[in-house]
Image: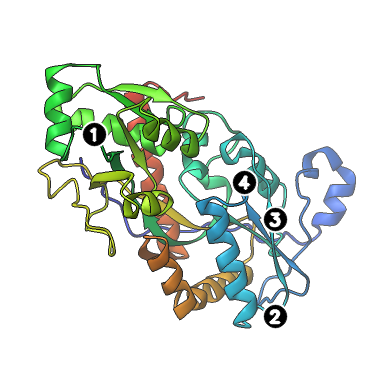
Amino acid sequence: MHMNRARRGTVSARPVVPGLAAVCVLTLSACSSLSGPTVQEGPWEPDDNIQMIIHADAGGSSDLMGRQIADILSSQDIVEQPVAPENRPGGSGAVAYTYLLGQEGNGHVIATLSSSYLTTAVQGKADYTYENFTNLAVLATDGLMITVSADSPYASLDDLVAAAREDPGQIDFGGTQLGGADSIVRHLLEEETGAELNYVSFDGGGEANAALLGGNVDVIAANPAEVQGLLESGRMRGLAVTTPERLEGLDVPTALEEGVELEFTQARGIVAPPGLTEGQRDFWGGAISEAARTQEWKDYLADNLLLEEVHVGTEAQSYVEAEWNKYAEVMDALGLREEG
């Protein structure tokens, strides 16, 4: 199953209305959500420290990306003010993005973007959607790798699919909660092949990896960078990656090469509060684009098995919208979408 994306769109912005402060004095309750500073239209540059909000715990892929971008922006003098990473995990991203929502008009706050930015809201578990924010940039995509233990009887994706067809529901597929990327890959694999796999959920990817190594599940869909060492040490075997092309440095075929029409990637990028001015959006679009051109960023992509995918401004908005539609379709199929 291919997940195609649109490439063009628009980013909305709400300029500050003259006299807004006076209106807020008279109608305080109606204006209480505007917690960000008042910003005038025109060219803009930060004049205070920058918060880089990371929506996940320290040590994970989103944390590494956020800290890498923050370091490049600061160390390469792309942004003159300090850029300080700050982890705000919880609620599958909802804690961080709810905080961001409350920073309307504040150009001194940016945040990491990954699949949970969309999937949590698509499932009706958040009081926001991507349309409530300023989607600044998509910088990369990453896929997953369908992985078994080294002593597994399944030497190829075809072996796994054949066994799952022969004994429906008898092969345990480990992953995180339903609605996560690994459960989506399981769903797409079943949809494209007719295989039936028993999904076993864990609290996190680390637990799923341990379950595979301990023989408690038969297969997982893992972040390639997080299990690369286990592949190199001979403890795990990759059957297929869900990216459109092979990942450099891994001798693992794509699902497409294996004859399964399964292509799935997750966007990674940067999002900002609602209500940024054109000057703020232009500044961040230029700064993030410059960071994405550095050798440090390209090395980070290679080291973490990410695919370069740069879209800024209106292109980023269009890309994120297409991702939302992709996840909405999958969540509908999984019975996990609640529409208000």
Is the Cβ of the residue at disc 2 closer than 8 Å to that at disc 3?
A: no
Q: Amino acid at mark 3?
A: Glu
- Comes first in the chain, label 4 or label 1: 4
Q: Residue drawn at (61%, 71%), measured in percent from left and top?
A: 71
Q: Quadrant of the N terminus?
A: top left
SS for tag 4?
A: loop
Q: What residue sits right under mark 2 in the picture?
A: 80
Number of residues whose C-alpha sits closer than 10 Å to that of mark 2, classed few (under 14), some (14–19) or many (20 or more): some
Residue 234 vs 301, above or below: the answer is above
Q: Amino acid at mark 4?
A: Asp
Say how the picture is coloured: rainbow
Q: Nearer the viewer, mark 4 or mark 1?
A: 1
Residue 300 vs 254, above or below: the answer is below
Q: Amino acid at mark 2?
A: Glu
Numbered tag placed on residue 152 in the rendering: 1
Residue 156 versus residue 191: which sits nearer the camera? 156
Residue 26 versus residue 279: which sits nearer the camera? 279
Q: Residue drawn at (19%, 50%), measured in percent from left and top?
A: 254
Q: Amino acid at mark 1?
A: Ser
Q: What residue sits right under mark 3 in the picture?
A: 86
- Comes first in the chain, label 4 or label 2: 4
Numbered tag placed on residue 308 in the rendering: none
From the viewer's perspective, tell me whether residue 111 is left or right of residue 136.
right
- Comes first in the chain, label 4 or label 3: 4
Number of residues whose C-alpha sits closer than 10 Å to that of mark 4, classed few (under 14), some (14–19) or many (20 or more): some
